[in-house]
Image (tube, helix red, strand yellow):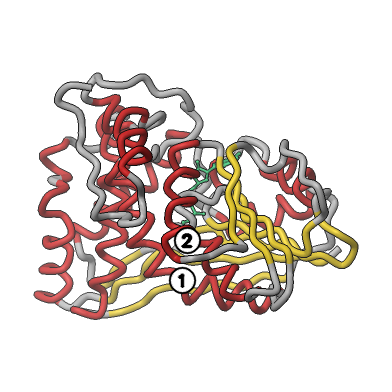
Amino acid sequence: MTGGPSFQLALYPGLTAKAQIQTSRTCPICYGCRAKGDIAMDNPAYPLGHSEHELERLNTQARYVEPATRRFFREAGVKVGMRVLDVGSGAGDVAFLAADLVGDAGEVIGADQVATAVAIATQRAKAKGLLNVSFRVGDPSELEFDRPFDAVVGRYVLLFQADAAGMVRKLAKHLSSGGVIVFHEPDWSGVRSFPPAPTYDACCRWVVEAFRRAGTDTNAAINLYRAFLGAGLPAPQMQMQTFIGFGAACTDWLKVAADLAGTLLPKIEQFGIATTAEVDVATLAQRLRDEAIASSPMIVGRSEIAAWSQL
Ligand SMILES: C[S@@+](CC[C@H](N)C(=O)[O-])C[C@H]1O[C@@H](n2cnc3c(N)ncnc32)[C@H](O)[C@@H]1O
């Protein structure tokens, strides 16, 4: 992988040198590598990949959305002592949050289709000293587990599924009677600025269009509800939280939006949505922030949507 991206231990300090080398050598579905002609992508259905930029983005995003996910999971009934399955565990942040909710008496198993992500999540759990959190490679709707779960949870994973209802139906089979299934997914249909902030509006347009062309759902509000009903579950309870702010208070959200545009840049280019020069990833977060501070428009961000049902 000559000339490919370097992956830094600083991002996940608990990662062993071996896992670090595996991370930098395998990078199985990273569009950044693909764009450089380094590594073939093996999962065209998942547009974000697991590049260094993407794993760092997940980390930044996890800090930004953690309070919303925590509230959603609590409302859904995730509590002390539960055994929890985390679907699409990525770098492990949702599993770690669930572990905090279930405490030492509970247990969390995360599953992700990508071995690199599971290696990183496993090392992070070890570094945190979490003995009741483990991770498995695979699609959890297809995996077998020795015992049922009290809760199945997931964040930002159903939007990537060709058949979200089918996946939810299979996942619900892992639940014990009275168990709860809860998903936290994004909805981009309400993003806007007023008076118009051209860079922000363009950034949101690039992201939404790249997702749409890649076949990724950007409208969780309606599709999450349909997925639960389509899975034969009771009509879910739902909640929505949307960022709204002015000036410097928008910084964290604008960074999340800019990072996502960075991860999606190869798609944005591939589909002819915008050029690398127009996006200018290196300066995008700063340009968004400067714009928000200079003219103080109202910035409405992505909505965080949760849906949950109890069996
Ligand atoms: C956007 S990331 C979110 C990670 C994590 N849930 C979080 O919120 O930080 C989505 C993750 O779901 C995984 N994923 C997507 N579809 C999956 C499937 N069918 N089975 C297992 N993992 C899946 C991807 O590999 C990726 O790591």
Percent coordinates x, y for residue 175 in the rendering: 82, 56
Quadrant in the picture for residue 167: top right
Q: Is residue 25 left or right of residue 212?
A: left
Mark pair 1, 2: CA separation: 9 Å
272 sits to left or right of 48:
left
Name the residue that disc number 2 marks.
93
CB at disc 2 and ligand 1 closer than 8 Å: yes
Q: Position of residue 136 (x, y in %)?
A: 60, 43
User: Dividing the picture into quarters, in which one does residue 201 lie?
Assistant: bottom left
Residue at the image point whose x is 12% and y is 49% from the top: 282
Disc 1 to disc 2: CB gap under 8 Å: yes
Residue 148 is tagged as none
Residue 158 visible in the picture? no
Residue drawn 45% across the image and 73% down it: 242
Q: Position of residue 191 (x, y in %)?
A: 38, 63
Residue receiving disc 1: 66
